[in-house]
Amino acid sequence: MCSTGNGFILNIMKKLIYLPILLFLGSLLVIACHDDSDDIEDTGLAAGKGRMILAFDNVVGKEDLVLDNKTYLNSFGESLTISRFNYFISNINLLREDGKTYTIPQDSSYFRILESDPKSQIISLNKLPEGNYSGIEYIIGVDSLRSVSGIEKRGGALDPSGDMAGDGMYWAWNSGYIFLKLEGSSPQSDASNGKFYYHIGLFGGFNSPTVNNIKTVKIDFGTNKAVVRGDSVPELKLIADVEKVYNGAMPISFAKNPSIMTDPVLSAGVANNYKSMFSLGEIKQNSQVRK
Amino acid sequence: MKKMDHDVLKKAGIIWCTVLLCIQLLLSCSGSGGNTNEPDPDPEPTGPTALRWVKPAHFPDPVYDLGKNPLTIEGVLLGKFLFYDGILSRTNVIGCGTCHQQQSAFTHHGHELSHGVDDLLGIRNAPAVQNMAWNPSFFWDGNTHALDSVPLNAIQNKVELDETMDNILLKLRATPVKNSKVPVDYPKMFKAAYGTTEITSEKVRLALSQFMMTMVSANSKYDYFVSGDAAALNTDEKNGMALFKQKCASCHSGELFTDFSYRNNGLAPNKINDQGRFSITKNDNDRYKFKVPSLRNIGLTAPYMHDGRFVSLEQVLDHYSDNMQPSATLDEVFKLSNGKVGVSLTAAEKQSIILFLRALGDDQFIRNAELSDPGVGNAL
């Protein structure tokens, strides 16, 4: 993939008309090669044949999240119903108990979790090296490199053409992806329709700087281990507590801030709130979950 | 081996960057930017180039008086930059194009309500900026009658752009700003459009109107059908059109699909009890009346109604068939002979009408690069 010789470059020089295009391709190769070398870390592991399931479960405090038909309270005593809760999970690293790390190949490491779509909440990680895994690390959101890469690197979960009225999670080139989207209604909301909209994103900006709200989560399984070996397929239940989004270190009032999107202070505050929303529920070993 | 390749490729990358830089420099010189300390290599301009505005053959005559603001290539270009540039807002982030995005026919891409400066929410759904040339009044309550004044409304609104024209003029005169995202040289652009670097409120607004005059949507499948291509609509869409004319066209009339009137269509008052036209006229007969919107590109402009309460066309038609609320100012057209209110529509008729409504979508309009953000905007 990286074996481009001098002759190739010289040839390009002769054909000046193709220069920008070919050099563009060339630079893509540089980026691609750079990526490859990044993936192979000192403690990194090569792919294997094992499998692991991640099952995301969204809750509100101790209760399961119910869309639209259940009323919750925030720390200001304002009541709310939740109509939409979506987030991106990406760049997953699995940490083995021997200190080695397996990085899920980046192209297969972007997931859009939607409360309204149970299928989206089950992720199958394939081709894993065998071993006892003791932790997991991932990004809530989308990394900045992918946020600015060409459209060919942004299919599937990253398709920017989603409908914002539905589950669309993309703004635009400079502002990038919405990492987490929480919408609902509150009688206390100051909005003319009584709703609230929290769209948290911003990766640092492509051509004008923004706040960087990319958050990395690291969950240690403690004494528990996820055993990936032969037919042994562990299922990790990862719990996301919506309450953390609005009841975290920076409590959110629906009356005061029914809309938080690009304000650097407020959006950073919400991102700091939700970075601790994940916890390990349980590890089921040998679960025969649907693929 | 691998190292050598990397070196070669790094060189390639450097050359590529240099080439890009050169292209950018060239672009900025010919377009907007340019280094004012260098002698200008361009020949002295001989004045702006007239741009012929063509009325779609089946459309009525425009309301806007082009004789008073003749379009020029340079004027439209300036208007386009002003339309997208966040410089029109207090925060320098929100532009017209933030809430009026091309891919959704210049509405706010799925937003029930729009968020302006500091994420503040507006109270109404952002209307489509299209075919402005034919509008006798603007906004849901018709509070503005002249296109040239429309931008002031959004500029001064505390939750939209929250800026003053005086301050905008100061900011425009101080361009190009080094290190800005795209260092637009507005004095130079005004010179190109008006023959003088003088920047005034009137010139800003006329340029914005010039650009908006070019935002004409008249190339939907329906338009091809009307222009003589009988095959442009399929049988289902033609059936839908016949039903539409029977059930909807008393208000959504003509080639703009609106009679530009204000009517109460039986929506339950929202949380803030928005009374629409009444807030302007203070006439009791205008309570809960809102502008009849054009239905062009309606398939692209969800959500619907003045507060974006319906997310789909299905919900809209269900409202008309089943969920309308009677009130003192409910439009006569909805009062049925059986004493009920609404529009009598079967499920099949609604589906048929929706097929026709989707045929009012204009792909060329939402893809036209002439109308796209020249790189100064923030879509959020």
Image (tube, coloured by chain):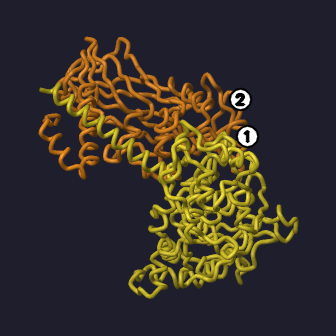
Letter of the chain shown orange in the rendering: A
Type of amino acid at the residue the image marks with label 2: Phe
- In the picture, the disc for residue A188 is 1
Residue B244, by quadrant, is bottom right
Camera-nearest residue between A113 and B82: B82
User: Residue A240, image x and y in percent?
Assistant: 48, 30
- In the picture, the disc for residue B40 is none
Q: Are marks 2 and 1 in contact (CB under 8 Å)?
A: yes
- Location of the C terminus of chain A by quadrant is top left
Q: Dot 1 surroundings within 10 Å: few (below 14), some, or many (20 or more)? A: some
User: Residue B38, image x and y in percent?
Assistant: 51, 43
- In the picture, the disc for residue A76 is 2
Secondary structure under badge 2?
loop
Q: Dot 2 surroundings within 10 Å: few (below 14), some, or many (20 or more)? A: few
**Residue drawn at x 71%, y 29% as measured from the top left:** A76
Give left or right: position of B377 versus B115: left
Q: Mark 2 lies on which chain?
A: A
